[in-house]
Amino acid sequence: MKELEHLRLLHLADSALPIGALAHSFGLESLVAQGFSTRELPEFLRGYLEEAGTVEAAFCREAFRLVSTGPRSFPAARWIEINDRLSALKPARESRTGSASLGQNFLTAVAGLGEFPVLMEALHTAKNSASVCHHSPAFGLAAGVLGLDEDRATLAYLHQSVAGLVSACQRLLPLGQSAATRILWDIKPAIIEAAKRNAECPAEDARCFMPLLDWGGMEHPALTTRLFVS
C-alpha cells in the first residue's frame, strides 16, 4: 500500500494533471515585462517559499486534517472558512481567481478517479455557499481522503507549485531545460524548510508579505500582450 500511496501522490502533483496550471504565471508575466531576469529567479523562489509558499502549505495541512482523523461528517462550515480566509490573503484578483480555478479543477479531476463523496461534497458546499475551492486546500483535502502522509503531501504541493513557476519562466525568459532543472534541484532544501515551518501553524496564524508578486498579479490585466491567464 505504501507504494500505491506514493504513486498516487506523484499523480496528484504531476504537471500533466488536467487542471489548467500551465495557463497561470501568478504575476510573473508582469514582473518579466518590467525587467525581471533569469538571474533573479532562484532568490525570488526562495522568497516565495518563505512567504506565499509557507501560507499555502499551512492551508494545505489545515484541509488535510479535516478528513485525516477518521470517519465523520464532512465539516462543511470549516471548509468554507478555510477557503474564504485564504481568499482574504490574496489581494490580487487574478491570483485569487486563478487559485480558485485550479482548486476546483483539481477536486473535479480527482473526484472523477473513483468514489470520493467527500470531494464531491466539498465542491457542492463551495458552489452552494458562493465560496471557492483554492488549490492548496483542495490538494490537502484530496491527500487526506486518499490516506496519504501529511508531510509528504505538503512537500509535493510546494514542489509542484515551484515547478509551475519555473515552467512559466521557461516560456517567458531565456531559461533552458538544464538551467531550469538545476534551479529546481537547488531549491529543494528551501521547500523542505518551508514545509517544516508551518507544521504547527494554524491557518488563522498564517501570514504573507510579498508585495512584488501581489503587484504583478494586479498589473497583469493591463499588459498589452499576455501569454498567461494570470
Image: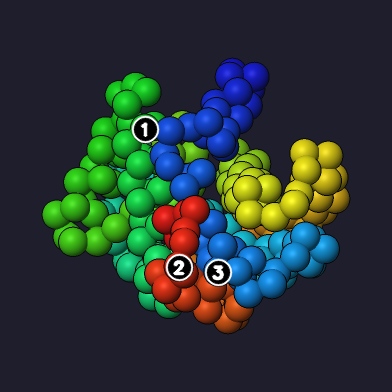
Label 3 vs 2, first from the N-terminus:
3
Horizontal side of residue 61 vs 90, given as left or right:
right
Disc assigned to residue 109 = 1
Query: For the residue labelled by badge 1, is the local secondary structure a helix, a strand or a loop?
Result: helix
User: Residue 35 in the image: x percent, y percent?
Assistant: 69, 72
Query: For the residue labelled by badge 2, is the local secondary structure a helix, a strand or a loop?
Result: loop
Front position among marks 1 and 2? 2
Q: Quadrant of residue 197?
A: bottom right
Decide: marks 3, 2 in contact (CB < 8 A)?
Answer: no
Label 3 vs 1, first from the N-terminus:
3
> Relative to residue 25, is residue 19 depicted above or below?
above
Looking at the rendered structure, the kind of residue marked 3 is Ser
Looking at the rendered structure, the kind of residue marked 2 is Thr
Query: For the residue labelled by badge 3, is the local secondary structure a helix, a strand or a loop?
Result: helix
Q: CA distance from mark 3 to mark 1?
A: 30 Å
* Residue located 36% across and 32% down the image: 109
* Residue located 40% across and 69% down the image: 221
Quadrant, the C terminus: bottom left
Residue 9 is at least partly visible in this image: no
Disc assigned to residue 30 = 3
Q: CA distance from mark 3 to mark 2?
A: 10 Å
> Relative to residue 7, is residue 181 depicted above or below?
below
Q: Which residue is at the front of the view, 162 or 141?
A: 162
Q: Which residue is mark 2?
A: 224
User: Residue 58 in the image: x percent, y percent?
Assistant: 55, 62
Front position among marks 3 and 1? 3
Horizontal side of residue 57 vs 48, given as left or right:
left
* Residue located 47% across and 54% down the image: 228
Front position among marks 3 and 2? 2
Looking at the rendered structure, the kind of residue marked 1 is Ala
Q: What residue occupies the far front of the structure in this picture?
A: 224
Horizontal side of residue 103 vs 124, given as left or right:
right
